Amino acid sequence: MPELPEVETSVRALKGFEGKILKNISVTNPHLRWKLDTKNIHALENLVVEKIFRRAKCIVLEFSDFFHLLHLGMTGTLRIQEASSNRIEKHDHIVFHFQDKSIVFNDTRKFGYFKILSKEAYRDFDRQLGPEPLSTNFSASYLQEKISKSNAAIKNLIMNQHVVVGVGNIYANEALFISNVHPMTSGNKLKNTEIDKLVKAIKQVLKKAIALGGTTLKDFYSPEGNKGYFKIKLKVYGNDNQPCPNCANSISRIVVGQRASFLCNKCQKLR
Ligand SMILES: [Zn+2]
């Protein structure tokens, strides 16, 4: 599934479309996670894309009066191709045509979605979300304040979009391991030094994955058409029964908040 680093990689690849006119949009299949509002989407035609950025795991195209949100879902990918190209692949659903190039949305499982929001609606969407993990707003003091009264498991807290956005399961596991925090530790039991380490670890694992061009398990192709997935060297995720890279104790798999969690019981003691 595309996680924050893959979405960030896509956004960076799309930056060249900023300031360009979106000439037209062709829809071959509107039946995505939610049925595409084909009438509304054509309202974007002949408008200039002013900015392209990421918010949480959404790719946002900003127009003068609208924000167009694109979520890649489970298997969504974007491909950039020459406008003159007639390349069509199975599961290509939507094509955004610009003067010289096109952006093609392909999605095998059709779990991606598109949304057009007014400026006010975008502000509401933005306000409901926690800070971006790589921004200075996501700091140890912020997280400390946010979790100090919570007895929820820290892993669930850092994966909660109201606390901080875009920390997916892989990165949550890795960051907790790096900071020696057991995923089940209650938020209110974390020491300040641990919170500080955890915040740094979250930023570190995400930055590393972005630098490598997006990780992940499968299904992700970068917009230039290269296979954009590869695994960053994961220390615990998916490594159950393998030796811990720090102490050689066997890595355990447990379930926290219905999600697979991997940890070393020696390096990450539960209090
Ligand atoms: Zn260990």
Image (tube, helix red, strand yellow):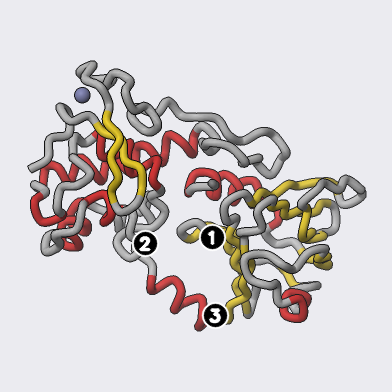
Q: Is the residue under label 2 in contact with that under label 3 (CB below 8 Å)?
A: no
Q: Nearer the viewer, mark 1 or mark 3?
A: 1
Which numbered tag is attached to residue 161? 2
Mark drawn on residue 23: none
Secondary element type, mark 3: helix
**Label 1 with label 3: CB-CB less than 8 Å:** no
The kind of residue tagged 1 is: Cys
Query: Marks 1 and 3, Cα distance to the nearest angstrom?
Result: 16 Å
Give the crowd class for mark 1: few <14, some 14-19, many >=20 residues within 10 Å.
many
**Residue 113 or residue 11, whichever sits in front:** 113
Label 2 – label 1 distance at C-alpha: 12 Å
Picture quadrant of residue 67: bottom right
Amino acid carrying mark 2 in the image: Gln
Residue located 64% across and 76% down the image? 64
Check whether the beta carbons of the residues at disc 2 and disc 1 lie within 8 A of each other. Answer: no
* Image quarter for ligand 1: top left
* Residue 230 sits in quarter: top right
Query: For the residues marked 3 and 2, what is the alpha-carbon distance in whole angstroms?
Result: 21 Å
| Element type at mark 2 | loop
Residue 51 spot, x, y in % from top left: 61, 63
The 10 Å Cα crowd at callout 3, few under 14, some 14 to 19, many 20 or more, is some
x and y, in percent, of residue 33 in the image = 62, 65
Which label's residue is closer to the chain start, 1 or 3?
1
Left or right: residue 208 compared with residue 144? right
The residue indicated by pointer 3 is 119
Q: Which residue is mark 1?
A: 58
Q: Which mark is first along the chain, 1 or 2?
A: 1
Whether the residue under disc 2 has CB within 8 Å of ligand 1: no
Q: Is mark 3 within 8 Å of ligand 1?
A: no
